[in-house]
Image (cartoon, rainbow, N blue to C red):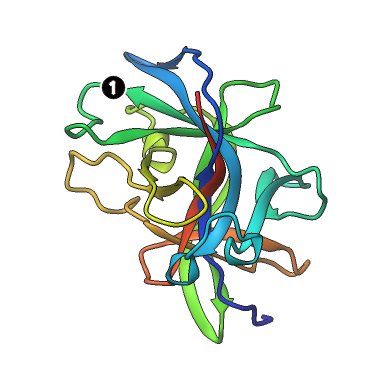
Amino acid sequence: MKFITPLLISLTIFGGVCLAASAANNGTSTASCTPTYKGKLHVTDLSELTNTANEDQRGYRVDVISGEEHDHITKQWSRGASDFIFEKCVLKGWNSGSKEYGTLKVDEFTVTNHVVTAEKRTDQLTLDGETYTGHILRFHTIGTPQSKRLDKQWFEAKHQDDKAGGAYVTLELTGNPNNKNADYDLPNAFFGTYDKNGLDRVLVTKSNTNYKLTVFDVKKL
């Protein structure tokens, strides 16, 4: 397994505003979702971020690649990388106070019910010589509380404006924040070599990697 430099997955969103709403059918429950933030998704080391406009501090931009298995998230391989959209969702028993919870989509996906999904695997990824376990990020149809898949798709977004260069948004996979099951409370992330083909994938993990999913060039929708 090859070694890679530490990276933080950060989703940072900058920009304007656009309003839209959608409903996700969750079996006997319905999540009411509204597009909230749009921007460029990165894996970012927040400890090194002092100016959000400095692309060298953002880490690697994240893109989507259609692979033989599933559409999955990896490093950006072209300048035309996709924008990601965070949709704030409301679902009974799945929200906590005024915090922003919801799902993450790709802007140009025509299949609008496909969202970023953490797939639990036995594989391990290596970062700076340290091996981590966690969940590979890919895409799947939005889940239901009954199917348990929604646990793998529920992110907490934190809009922050404490750096030079403008606002950014960090994303943390939380699972259901109101139950005691921490299996999908995976706040950290990084890139690592995933399989025999040497593909780099994004992993979310409990382990402290100093990296987060971050959105830059944020637009409030």
Q: Is residue 120 above or below residue 210?
A: above
Q: Is residue 157 above or below residue 194?
A: above
Q: Nearer the viewer, residue 130 or 50?
A: 50
Residue visible at 60% across and 64% down? 59
Q: Which residue is mark 1?
A: 91
Residue 219: quarter of image: top right
Q: Nearer the viewer, residue 101 or 30?
A: 101
Quarter placement of the N terminus = bottom right
Query: The residue under label 1 is which amino acid type?
Result: Leu
Answer with left or right where residue 87 lies relative to residue 75. left
Residue visible at 75% across and 44% down? 81
**SS at mark 1?**
loop
Q: Is residue 121 visible?
A: no
Q: Is residue 18 visible?
A: yes
Give the image location of residue 220, x and y in percent.
48, 28
Mark 1 residue crowding within 10 angstroms, few (<14) / some (14–19) / many (20+): some
Residue visible at 80% across and 55% down? 77
